[in-house]
Image (tube, rainbow, N blue to C red):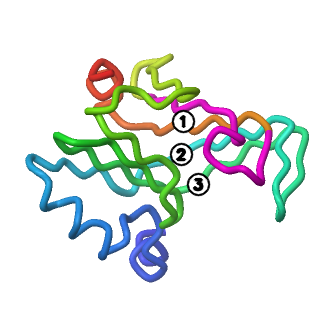
Amino acid sequence: MGMLLRLFRLGRIPAEEKQVLLNESSARTIEHIWVKVKLKSFRSKRKRTNWQVRILWGALMVTDQRIAAWIMGRRMVNAPWSEGRPEGLSIDSPKEGSLRFAFRAEDFDEQASGQVELVFYTPQARQLAARW
């Protein structure tokens, strides 16, 4: 599995984005972590599902300015600390070692609807959730 992670760069932050965010002060990166993606009554141009759960690879980056999350190399969350929590985005740590982002798809993408829940499994989850 380690070879596949390196070969396809699964669970990593894309190099261009990583370089930009590393310039922000005190950046902390957590890569190659499991992410559970739950979709409920989800509709978009490419996907329709009433209920779907998938386990994928992801990454988190926390800086003094923001928290950002990627799944399979695609940015899913980019929440600046200064603006407070974006309307409709819930961030918490329901269990030890898990950080959950929950939101309505239509709040972030006009062409999508439904409920999205991303659960990142990392030992630093409680510390990150407490920041909000």
The residue depicted at 64 percent of the width and 43 percent of the height is: 37
Q: Residues within 10 Å of mark 2 (few under 14, many from 20)?
A: many
Q: Are marks 2 and 3 in contact (CB under 8 Å)?
A: yes
Alpha carbon distance from label 2 to label 3: 5 Å
> What residue is disc 2 on?
35
How far apart, in angstroms, are the residues tagged by discs 1 and 3? Answer: 10 Å
Circles 1 and 2, Cβ within 8 Å, touching? The answer is yes
Count the labels in the image. 3
Q: Vertically, is 86 above or below 94?
A: below
Q: Earlier in the sequence, mark 1 or mark 2?
A: 2
Residue at left 74%, top 34%? Answer: 115
Relative to the observer, which residue lies in front, 27 or 65? Answer: 65
> Which residue sits at x=63%, y=35%?
117
The three-letter code of the residue at mark 1 reads: Val
Q: Secondary structure at mark 2?
A: strand
Q: Which residue is mark 1?
A: 119
Residue 88 magenta-highlighted: no
Please state the horizontal and vertical placement of residue 20, each as a whole percent of the image.
Answer: 22, 66
Q: Which residues are magenta?
A: 98-113
Secondary structure state at the residue bearing disc 1: strand
Queried whether the magenta region covers residue 100, the answer comes back as yes
The circle drawn on residue 56 is: 3
- In this rendering, position of residue 121 left or right of residue 18: right
Q: Looking at the picture, which amino acid does disc 2 mark?
A: Val
Residue lying farthest to the left in this orientation: 25
Image position of 44 with respect to 81: above or below:
below
